[in-house]
């Protein structure tokens, strides 16, 4: 029937093109100053269930929120440099002063699950360009105003910035 | 006690350095002609549980085996070009003639779960360099001699090439 045909057509449309030019994919700041985000392979648009891949460019002085999540996250730096701030103190009441790590072209790092972290482009002369990989998409992140905010006061941001247009927040017990 | 201290020490050793230079990581062909493989973030060496990231360079005319796996896999092409061969016929008795897709710099594609596939560097003038992401590491792949080999005759390659030195094959019921 017509619905079956529509379903087949939408699956066919969804799977084409299999090979995509990253520079032609939707690119937006999603309201975050200095960010250019591309979902390379994602849960919402590409039906990924276990991994999601982003291509992100941060203009000088721009950065991620201070945040944590229970999924795994791997960064590969393609261009530019910056600073990773990482607090490994999930057993304390608040993140506290983070460790600082220099990140540079062709470097990689992963964030230990639930550690509070932030990535900054601290190089005022160049964009910071990275491939970012997360597990168990779509990402459910808890956001902090600063490093001394108690873990219990951090706020769940779900759907995350780029998933907002297409995802509704589910009932709490689905998280 | 001493074991607790040893445990803390090994965790500390394992986590350093957090930021790694990809060009300084172990790089090897693992017995495959024309391949240069780097595990950027992996199950065996970095304790990843949900995603694994590779940096792979294929010399002209080199390629992956014809294979399938039940994990998700995403490719991001950094440099060079080549051909993706993909057979979407897991419901048939054997893969059959695959579709061919041109892959190029800054392109991305993901492999539908369990579809039989192979990536070739078909550009005789340039290396093909890619970031490869898989879910549920370490990878368990079934390998085919050719596109007309029955699915039931494909052979499990576990541990996979780069995991061989550090992983023992588990009893079958763990797969
Ligand atoms: Zn994060
Ligand atoms: Zn594969």
Image: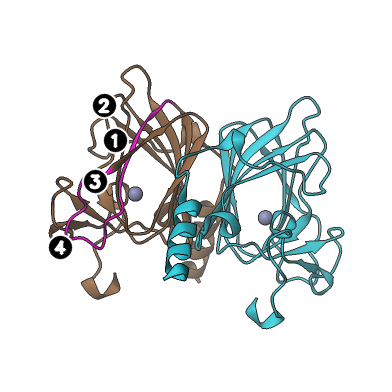
Chain colours: A brown, B cyan
User: In the rendered structure, which disc, 2 or 1, sits on the residue that comes first in sequence?
Assistant: 1
Whole-percent x, y for residue B171 in the image: 70, 80
Q: Magenta stretch mostly in which secondary structure? A: loop
What's the CA distance linking mark 3 and mark 2? 14 Å
From this viewpoint, is residue B69 visible?
Answer: yes
Q: Residue at x 82, y 48 (%)?
A: B31
Check contact, mark 3 vs mark 2: CB within 8 A.
no
Q: Which residue is mark 4?
A: A152
Q: Residue furthest bottom?
A: B173
Determine the chain carrying the residue at label 1: A
Q: Which residue is mark 2?
A: A61
| Dot 1 beta carbon under 8 Å from ligand 1 | no
Q: Residue at x 21, y 44 (%)?
A: A97
Which image quadrant: the C terminus of chain B? bottom right
Confirm whether circles 1 and 4 share one chain.
yes
Q: Is residue B57 above or below residue B140?
A: above
Check contact, mark 2 vs mark 1: CB within 8 A.
no
10 Å crowding of disc 1: few (<14), some (14-19), many (20+): some
What's the CA distance linking mark 1 and mark 3? 17 Å
Tag shown at residue A66: 3
Q: Is residue A89 magenta?
A: yes
Question: Magenta segment, which residues?
Answer: A80-98
User: In the rendered structure, which disc, 1 or 4, sits on the residue that comes first in sequence?
Assistant: 1
User: In the rendered structure, which disc, 2 or 4, sits on the residue that comes first in sequence?
Assistant: 2
Confirm whether circles 4 and 3 share one chain.
yes
């Amino acid at each position: 029937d017509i619905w079956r045909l529509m379903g087949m057509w939408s699956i066919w449309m969804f799977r084409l093109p299999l090979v995509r030019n990253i520079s032609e994919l939707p690119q937006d700041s999603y309201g975050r100053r200095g960010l250019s985000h591309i979902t390379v392979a994602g849960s919402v648009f590409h039906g990924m269930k276990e991994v999601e891949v982003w291509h992100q460019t941060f203009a000088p002085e721009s950065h991620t929120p201070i945040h944590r999540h229970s999924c795994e996250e791997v960064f590969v730096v393609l261009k530019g440099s910056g600073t990773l701030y990482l607090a490994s103190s999930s057993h304390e009441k608040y993140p506290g002063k983070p460790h600082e790590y220099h990140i540079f072209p062709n470097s990689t790092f992963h964030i230990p699950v639930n550690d509070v972290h932030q990535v900054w482009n601290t190089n005022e002369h160049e964009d910071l360009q990275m491939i970012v990989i997360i597990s168990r998409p779509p990402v459910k992140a808890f956001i902090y105003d600063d490093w001394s905010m108690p873990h219990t006061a951090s706020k769940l941001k779900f759907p995350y910035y780029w998933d907002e247009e297409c995802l509704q927040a589910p009932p709490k017990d689905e998280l």
